[in-house]
Image (cartoon, grey):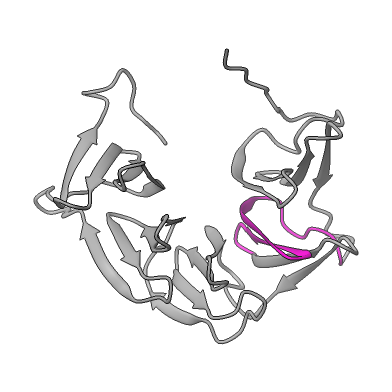
Amino acid sequence: TIHFENFSDGEGEYQLSNGDVLTAEEDPIGNIWVGTEGGLNYLDRKNNHIKRYQYAPQVPVSLQAAPVLSVEQIDNHLLFGTWATGLVQLDLTTETFKHITEFWMEDSPAFIHVGKNDKLWMGSHKGLLLFEDKNILAHGKLLLDYPALTVYESISGDIWIGGYFNLLQYSSSGVLLSSWHYNQEDKSGLLPPGEILAITEDSSGNIWLGSKGGAIQLNRNTNTSVSYTHLTLPTTPYV
């Protein structure tokens, strides 16, 4: 039997700051960080409790922006991207927030990802940055100057980046290995039209993509794809 537990917004101790969930990340002890339109939430599954961090502009060391788009825990601090105000760091020991102004001061990091080799990848509508050290957010290398919206690290350690009408495969060190595109003029290519919203990998090593145009399975051995849209499935698969 499959059991679902629903977490909605409200004022209770086991409710989220907002019902629109934008991102979620599991921490090393199995609890969940949840970013919503209304702030940051920490879901303590063992103690059946949700701690909420909400927008409080009158307190300088508190959360200074409400929508939280991306989350990544690095040792004893949390990095997260906020809408239109950039990158924020939460010290998990002191529970104080610090706005990191060096990068994307007026942009919204769509994802933050630490790879298996401890390099840090960060994407936004402005592009893709790679930092050699997850703990030193300086001198990031710009790999793309167009939108990078979602990330997936494969079993082999390659980094897959999805954007508008394109998919890119990088080595763990940041070398571009392959790219796929959707041609908007003649509506051709292996990808579905629109944004790549999700990327994952199946047990055979094939890459699955989710977009507003449907889902697609990319066969890496034959370089072919199979599309699943509202014409082949009961409903359009927003993944």
Q: Is residue 109 visible?
A: no
Q: Quadrant location of residue 120?
A: bottom right
Q: Quadrant location of residue 21?
A: top right
**Is 150 positioned to the left or the right of 224 in the image?**
right
173 and 229: which one is in front?
A: 173
Q: What's the residue at 86%, 28% (across, down)?
A: 12
Q: Position of residue 161 (x, y in %)?
A: 38, 60
Q: Is residue 200 above or below residue 79?
A: above
- Outermost residue toward the left in this view: 186
The residues colored magenta run: 61-85
134 and 97: which one is in front?
A: 134
Q: Is residue 226 above or below residue 77?
A: above
Q: What's the residue at 62%, 20% (across, down)?
A: 4
Q: Position of residue 124 (x, y in %)?
A: 48, 64
Q: Position of residue 172 (x, y in %)?
A: 43, 71
Q: Is residue 14 visible?
A: yes
Q: What's the residue at 35%, 68% (across, down)?
A: 170
Q: What's the residue at 75%, 35% (across, down)?
A: 16
- Taking the magenta stretch, the answer to whether it contains residue 230 is no
Q: Position of residue 185 (x, y in %)?
A: 12, 54
Location of the N terminus (image quadrant): top right
- Taking the magenta stretch, the answer to whether it contains residue 73 is yes
Q: Is residue 164 above or below residue 6?
A: below
